[in-house]
Amino acid sequence: REERKLWNSIALREAEIKKDQVINVSTIFSGVTILTNNNIKVIVKSDSLFGGVSNHIEEKDEAKAIYINASCLFGGVEIKWIYQKRL
């Protein structure tokens, strides 16, 4: 299912990830924050020009994965655990 968001955050803190998932994120002159719980693995593939992706989730070998495909143009994506303070 494709879902378009016009605000700047995606909250997955209560999501139960039962199998690997893919999230496609595009930013142009803006940023997106993805908030997750701490029991998943995040794998990022990014094509960025004057922007980038910050993944603050620790690696976990046996957890279900969320694959994030990010395209950033003068913007960025931040991925963090919900209880993690802003860096």
Image (cartoon, rainbow, N blue to C red):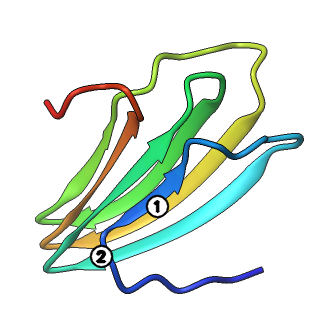
Q: Residue 23: which disc?
A: none
Residue 2, quarter of picture = bottom right
Looking at the rendered structure, the kind of residue marked 1 is: Ile
Which element carries disc 1, helix, strand or loop?
Answer: strand
Query: 65 and 47: which one is in front?
Result: 65
Q: Is residue 67 above or below residue 56?
A: below
Q: Is residue 81 above or below residue 52?
A: above
In percent of the image, x 44 and y 45: which residue is there?
35
Rendered location of residue 9, percent (x, y): 37, 63
Q: Residue 10: which disc?
A: 1
**Residue ranking furthest to the right:** 18
In percent of the image, x 33 and y 78: which residue is there?
7
- Disc 2 crowd rating (10 Å Cα; few below 14, some 14-19, many 20+) is some
* Quadrant in the picture for the C terminus: top left
Q: Is residue 64 above or below residue 69?
A: above
In percent of the image, x 53 and y 86: which residue is there?
4
Tell me: 85 left or right of 3. left
In percent of the image, x 70 and y 13: which residue is there?
61
- Disc tally is 2
* Quadrant in the picture for the N terminus: bottom right
Mark 2, residue position:
27
Rendered location of residue 17, percent (x, y): 79, 41
Foreground label between 2 and 1:
1
Residue 84, quarter of picture = top left
Tell me: 29 left or right of 27. left
Rendered location of residue 21, percent (x, y): 75, 52
